[in-house]
Amino acid sequence: MNEEKRNSTDFASQGDAPAPQEKDVAAADVVFPAIVMILSVLAFYHAYGMRVPQTMLDAPGLFPMVMSSLIFLTAVVVFVNGIRNRGWQKLKRFWSQDGAIKGNVMLIRALVISALMLLYVYVLIPELPYFVASFVFLIALMLFLRSTKIIYIVVIAAVASYAIYYLFRHALNIPLP
Amino acid sequence: MEALLQRLAAEWALVTGVAGNVFAPQVLMLVLLGTFLGILVGTIPGLTATMTLALLVGLTYGLGFNSAIAMLIGIFVGAIYGGCIASIMINIPGTPSAAAAALDGFPLAKQGKGGLAIGVGTLTSFFGMLFGILCMILITPLVLRLALMMGAWEFFLLAILGITLCGTLSSQETAIKGWMVGFLGLFITTVGLDPIYATPRFTFGHVQLMGGIALVPALIGAFGISEVLMVLKEQVPYEITMRTGKIIPGMKQTLRLLPTAIRSGIIGVFVGAVPGAGEDISAWVSYGIAKKRSKHEEQFGKGSYEGIAAAETGNNAAISGTLIPIITLAIPGSGASAMILAAMIIHGIRPGPMLPLEHPGFTYHLALLLVIASVAMLIFGLALAKGLVYLLTAPRQILMPIIVVVCAIGAYASSFRAFDIRVMVLIGIVCYVLREMKYPIAPLALGVVLGPMADSEFRRAMLSSRGDLTAVFSRPIALVILLVIVLTLLLSSGVVMDKIRAAARSVRRKRARP
């Protein structure tokens, strides 16, 4: 058994085995499953407390209890794998690095785009007519992405917003938010 | 003999019965439009078949089932095919299922033979479609007969099997991550009022949550918004070879590819029918086997037409393959086909063993739509190939923001709740984060689709067996499904696979010794 283990390690170290990709996300494999474990315990507890109309066998809380248990079990395995892949050390190293987030251009881009989307659905759509909200959102996102020249961005945003509004509201008769 | 003729006459009556619906001018136009749009979408990298289908499930809600399914089938067929154009010309798959075609297509494009590679891809895609449709017509009744013998336990276990298989096959690294998000998908569907006793579950007093997490916004978020974030977070420049050369291959060349196409068609249908495997894996398996069986193995990866034929026949044959478990068991074979299932569910069509009684000739209905879409795909593909290459220059930084706006309408259109748009964006962002952490999204979507069925069947099964879990062992089909689940779990877990690999290595070492 030990010999087999040693051989398999040698095999991997020779580069014949596929690269161990999980180490790239090992830090996340510690944090995320830990959060999921806590949430699944809370979900189980909440489901357990649900009203039982007749029998537990068809109680509303039964299926969520089974699912939260399965989620908990799988999260434990991912968490243990994360620890084995030195996820904890990687996490500590990540936080101790200066500008770990600042230097990650892709992360910043994703964060800003997500923030713009949230702004669109939580602020612009409830407060403004759909056509105007979409126009503002398109300009903001395309400006951030530097899609093209500003004048073109304004024209594209106006044409796209109106075309979408006209196509769905009038041509396809679909109510808009 | 007479019985056979009677059976054939009855089947023909079913075909003619549904033909009226399929060949109605509006339906016909929508299949053609859907196929054309699908090819456009498939050609542009970043716009996937699943994303577009998720978006259009909501938008076609008002069209009625016949028209909606016609358009969705067209888009499904067109997008899976269209992916090969980007794969061949710029080495970036237009859709994930076209990735295998890039291995040989791009080297050919660099040699100025991109047009011929697209031509071979188009013809073999068409062949794969027809072969898949034929298999779907032949296999579906057999599976339906089996499905009639199934009860609550079997359907619940099938849902779990779908999640485990999908989780295993779609995970980039460990299968456990796929299972985890799959169970998460099943769990999400329990939010809202319980369908049996109307007990609020995980609503925390919010009125909006009483209606639950709607299927369409969840799917648009999972595939649409997360894809937009994945594409826009980085700017990948690519070089386009606009020189295509001739498109249509010669008769001799086409006939030489026939054995590869037939083999890949069979692989495509059967791999496609496995829940979670879908078009991507079908293409890779077909490509891998074609390479091993080829007399010119050395040409694979350097510009082999056989390689393109295998990949493209495989992924297109898989389209019909993925529809078999949908029609018979209400379990989708891939993320894209999960959208077809979602469309059926929201239009009140309940797939499964009772489908032939409730909607006679439904399989023929789908088959006819697929045939029309395939013919349209062949014509559009060959006629517009050169023009489609120009589409690859479309800037994604302009397209993607517009897609977000359309996604919002798609999420809203299914039940006219502004709340659904917020849910869509939140699920999209969560799914993006999951994808960054190498969690597959397909099992989550499958869980969201199968959740309500799994919940009700599990409770029905528990009630009918009075809580006795050993009841599964007295049901042969349930037992077989359970064994497959256990086998999947064991084979996918590292412990068993490590032992198998170690055993294989020791056998190889022994053989190598003189």
Image: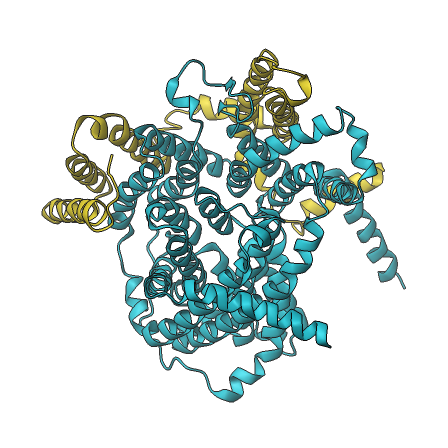
Chain colours: A yellow, B cyan
The residue located at (33%, 42%) in the rendering is: B410
Quarter of the image with the N terminus of chain B is bottom right
Report if residue A42 is visible in the image: yes
**Residue B4's image quarter?**
bottom right
Front residue of this view, candidates B274 and A54: A54
Front residue of this view, candidates A41 and B341: B341
Residue B416 screen position, x and y as percent: 31, 34
Is residue A76 shown left or right of residue A43?
Answer: right
Residue A130 screen position, x and y as percent: 19, 35
Residue B177 screen position, x and y as percent: 59, 36
Is residue A6 shown left or right of residue B344?
Answer: right
The residue located at (28%, 66%) in the rendering is: B390
**Residue A136's image quarter?**
top left
Front residue of this view, candidates B300 and B406: B406
Front residue of this view, candidates B116 and B513: B116
Residue placed farthest to the left in the image? Answer: A151
Residue B179 screen position, x and y as percent: 61, 36
The residue located at (52%, 76%) in the rendering is: B305
The residue located at (37%, 60%) in the rendering is: B38
Residue placed farthest to the right in the image? Answer: B514
Quarter of the image with the C terminus of chain B is bottom right
Q: Tally the numbered discs.
A: 0
Is residue B450 shown left or right of residue A174?
Answer: right
**Residue B513's image quarter?**
bottom right
Report if residue B311 is visible in the image: no
